[in-house]
Image (tube, rainbow, N blue to C red):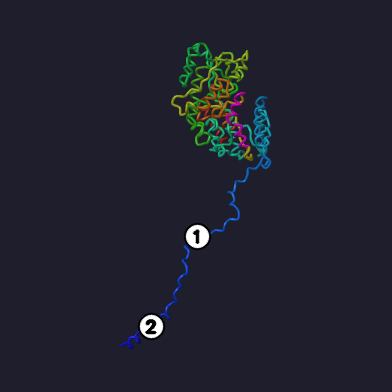
Amino acid sequence: MSQKFFTIISVLLIAVFALSGCAAPATPAPTEEAPAAVEPTKPAPTQPPAEPTEAPPEPTAAELPKVTITWWHIQVADDQKALWQSMADQYMADHPNVTIEITVLENEAFKTKIATVMQSGNPPDIFQSWGGGGMNEYAKAGLLKDITADLEKDGWKDTFSPGALGVFSFEGKYYGVPRDMGAVGFWYNKDLFAQAGIETPPATWSEFLEVVKKLKAAGITPIALGEGDKWPGAFYWEYLAVRVGGQAAFDAAYSRKGAFTDEPFVEAGRKLLELVALEPFQDGFLGATWPDEQVVMATSKAAMDLMGQWAPGAFKDASVDKQGLGDKLGWFPFPAVEGGAGDPADALGGGNGFVIGKDAEPEAVDFLKYISSKESQIAQAQIGLSVPVVKGAEVGLTDPMLLLVQKGAAAAKYFQLYYDQAMPPAVGGVVNDAVQGLFAGTLTPEEAAAMIEESAALELK
């Protein structure tokens, strides 16, 4: 049995060795514990990390490209020329790469010269403009730079009275900015009003007609008018059109979506004839001129005068003692027309500004922004150069009458430029002629409107 036991053991050992020879070789056990897996080690830097890259330094004045700005203005009075020159000098001192070349021209000489350079297609970088029709024609011809984006940047646009700024826009784009804007209104003699028992200025057209009647009853000529020059009388019809039809009526007629024979313009003629029928003007008014009109007011021979912001100065010059009416002079806005579509605060008037030529560099727009700042406007007002259009600059006005005009203009959401400036000169001339026909009784309201429409159909395209 022992022999049999050992035989079995031998067989089993032989089988085990045979099987182990067929199995895959075992991985030998490590002689020490394997290190845990770690992130690869980055090589140590040989120098400290570089600082973040900085923006390149601003170019110095010597490195900036040289820019020349050509600027044409019409301020020929010594103090006004000096003010503009001082502002140009300061800007050049602050911007050494910029040179501003100023050309000063008298009003009529400017109009002649600017027409010539515009025909050549080479406008100045910055130049005098009254906005309206003339500016629109230049814009349509591609001679002006669109500065809308510049105005909307950094709130520049919001510094202006909206009605005044609107005069320098065309088809939704701005080509310049105003520096001076005055509203036409009624200048009146307070003493003559008191003599007629009139305590407050009229606010509506009906009240205005009643004031005329009271003045006549007191033996006082109600209104001074130099209709021989035509444009003074045109103010009445144009203002009545503003009050009756509002901005919508003019925009429709001007764009040719409507016409100057539309009802608001005919009704303006009818309202004017209501006034003419009262015979409110001085004797000989149809042949009188604007200088004659000044004298009638300055000598207290009439109680009212519908005129622009220049009237107080004109009255002083026309008076014997060169003092004008002094404290006797008052001002009120053109009356509202009952039932009219126009806002009673809307104004008729005009002023001055600057536009930008088509090839002007960005520095020209920046300089225009500089001279239309609040500080610049205050300085202009202090020497009587401008009735401010920038909010807050009215503090520079010292004449209380001009402050009244400024407030009236600033309150206007819509500013109707005089028709002879808002439209091509040919149409403006016909407006003046047609309105004179209403004053003279030679045209009906319908005929006057048709006469204006005929010219507009030819010129407004």
Q: Which amino acid does label 2 sit on?
A: Leu
Tell me if 28 is positioned left or right of 431 in this view.
Answer: left
Camera-side residue of 219 and 342: 342
Q: Is 402 included in the stretch rendered in magenta?
A: no
Which label sits on residue 39?
1
Q: What residue is at 56 percent from the left and 19 percent from the top?
A: 225
Which label sits on residue 325?
none
Q: How many tags in the picture?
A: 2
State the image quarter where residue 234 is shown.
top right
Task: Tell me residue 416's x, y (percent).
Answer: 53, 29
Q: Mark 1 and mark 2: span between their CA atoms? A: 49 Å
Task: Tell me residue 278's x, y (percent).
Answer: 50, 17
Tell me if 65 is positioned left or right of 344 in this view.
Answer: right
Q: What residue is at 60 percent from the left and 46 percent from the top?
A: 55
Q: Is 381 included in the stretch rendered in magenta?
A: yes
Task: Tell me residue 259's x, y (percent).
Answer: 51, 33
Residue lying furthest left in this view? 1
Can residue 86 be seen here? The reply is: yes
State the image quarter where residue 14 is shown.
bottom left
Task: Tell me residue 223's x, y (percent).
Answer: 54, 17
Q: What residue type is labelled 1?
A: Glu
**Residue with the mark numbered 2:** 13
Q: In which quarter of the image is the C terminus?
A: top right
Provide the residue span drawn in magenta. 364-383
- Tell which circle, 1 or 2, labels the residue nearer the N-terminal end: 2
Crowdedness of circle 1 by 10 Å Cα count: few (<14), some, many (20+)? Answer: few
Crowdedness of circle 2 by 10 Å Cα count: few (<14), some, many (20+)? Answer: few
Q: In which quarter of the image is the N terminus?
A: bottom left
Q: Tag 2's secondary structure?
A: helix
Camera-side residue of 397 and 213: 397
Q: In this view, does 221 lie above or below 457?
A: above
